[in-house]
Image: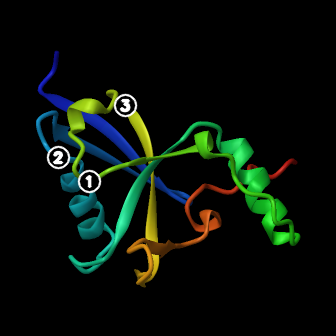
Amino acid sequence: MSDIKFIRCRRSNQTFYIHIPSSSPVSSIQDHIKELLSQPNDALLRLIKIQDVDHVREYVESTKEGSQESLPEPALEVVYAESNVNDLENNQLLYVQFADGPPEEEDGEPQWESLENVIEPAEEEA
């Protein structure tokens, strides 16, 4: 098994290609993304795996139209900062999502930005 993993991190229409040692924590990827996007070190971001991007796009469109439908849990999987890069597959695609503000006092979880800012737009039909 290789000591280096190739990880793709996507945010809207940008993709970052990162080579990182397998033994590194996922927080190293997060730090690298913050640096690439000129974000402060204390910026909150999370990396997520999206199982079906088309389904998430449909959800984003339905919320624009006022639907209160919730996104089924298996559609997104958060990759925690404490995780190890070795737990990810080589050539893994992760999506970058930033917090909209500080953590809520009730549960300590920040309000995350809209998925519309995270996933790439659907291809326009010609």
Question: Neighbour class for label 1 at 10 Å: few (<14), some, many (≥20)?
Answer: some
Q: Which residue in the structure is indicated by mark 1?
A: 81
User: Which of the 4 image quarters holds residue 44?
Assistant: bottom left
Indicate whether 78 appears above or below 110: above
Q: Which quarter shows the N terminus?
A: top left
Query: Quick one: 109 or 80, which is closer to the camera?
Result: 109
Q: Residue at x 18, y 54 (%)?
A: 28
Q: CA distance from mark 2 to mark 3?
A: 16 Å
Q: In the image, is 12 to the left or to the right of 59?
A: left
Mark 1 or mark 2, earlier in chain: 2
- How many numbered dots are placed on residues in this image? 3
Question: Residue 121 in the image: x percent, y percent?
Answer: 68, 57
- Image marks 1 and 2: residues in contact by CB distance under 8 Å: yes
Provide residue 31's location: percent of width, then percent of height: 22, 62
Amino acid at circle 3: Asn
Q: Residue at x 38, y 60 (%)?
A: 46
Q: Is residue 63 left or right of residue 95?
A: right
Name which of mark 1 and mark 3 comes first in the sequence: 1
Q: How far apart are labels 1 and 3 at the CA level? A: 18 Å
Dot 3: within a 10 Å radius of its alpha carbon, few (fewer than 14), some, or many (20 or more) residues? some
Q: Is residue 1 left or right of residue 104?
A: left
Amino acid marked by disc 1: Ala
Label at residue 25: 2
When asked about the image quadrant of residue 92, the answer is: top left
Instruction: Please tell me whether residue 105 is drawn above or below residue 50 in the rendered image.
Output: below
In the picture shown, does residue 94 fall above or below 106? above
Q: How is the image coloured?
A: rainbow
